[in-house]
Amino acid sequence: MSFRKDDAAVGTRSSLRVPTASPKLLIVALLSLSYLTSLIVATHQWAFIINPLQSGDAIRTVELLFFWAGWLLMTVGAAAIALDCLLSSGSSTKYLYLVALVHPMSVIAIQSTLRLRSGHWYLNYLTSNVWFLLSDVAVPVLFWILYRQSQGAMADEADEASSLERVTHE
């Protein structure tokens, strides 16, 4: 995937998009967020490495499987996408939305189930440990921003191709 600087002209279609990231910035950001998430998981294993099959409840098992998938995507998936950007076309950036959304959606599902069953929200963990605020809120938001930027770069690339095609046909 090639990236180009955002067109700063006011009123153009590209000025209404999320600014695009350079390939180096995208790769560094993906690897940094992947590393940060890995550190959080490694230092808080008691909160992340849970055997979903021992929950004894089918709904909880499914939620915990998605929870596992979410943090694995944020650690390994983000690094794999960064390597794809480094070694090839970077076409896997279209899957960044999964990296950004699976973990927080699983946390929302778990919290909603706990609320329905107990009548209480258990969100105090976000304020009692700042690392969980990072892993459950900040990092997914940053992954979403990177996803939007990478998609903006692809749209800019498509606009350039169509503009070039129009010029060659004229």
Image (tube, grey):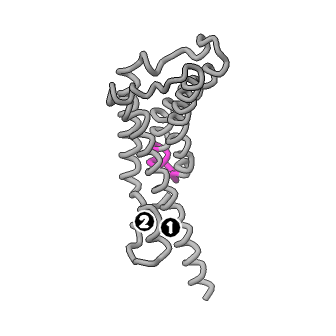
Dot placed on the residue nearer the N-terminal end, 1 or 2: 2
Q: Residue at x 63, y 24 (%)?
A: 62
Q: Position of residue 53 (x, y in %)?
A: 61, 14
**24 above or below 75?**
below
Q: Tag 2's secondary structure?
A: loop
Question: In the rendered image, which residue does mark 1 sit on?
Answer: 156
**11 above or below 29?**
below
* Amino acid carrying mark 1 in the image: Asp
Q: Residue at x 43, y 34 (%)?
A: 136
**Quick check: marks 1 and 2 in contact, CB under 8 Å?**
yes
Is residue 149 shown left or right of residue 53? left
**44 above or below 18?**
above
Q: Position of residue 120 (x, y in %)?
A: 50, 24
Classified by dominant secondary structure, the portion drawn in magenta counts as helix
Camera-nearest residue between 124 and 30: 124
Question: In the rendered image, which residue does mark 2 sit on?
Answer: 4
Camera-nearest residue between 16 and 14: 16
Q: Residue at x 49, y 61 (%)?
A: 152
Q: Which residues are magenta?
A: 82-90
Q: Residue at x 67, y 18 (%)?
A: 58
Q: Quadrant of residue 57?
A: top right
Quadrant of the drawing holding the C terminus: bottom right
Distance Cα–Cα, label 1 vs label 2: 8 Å
Callout 2 environment at 10 Å: few (<14), some (14 to 19), or many (20+)? some
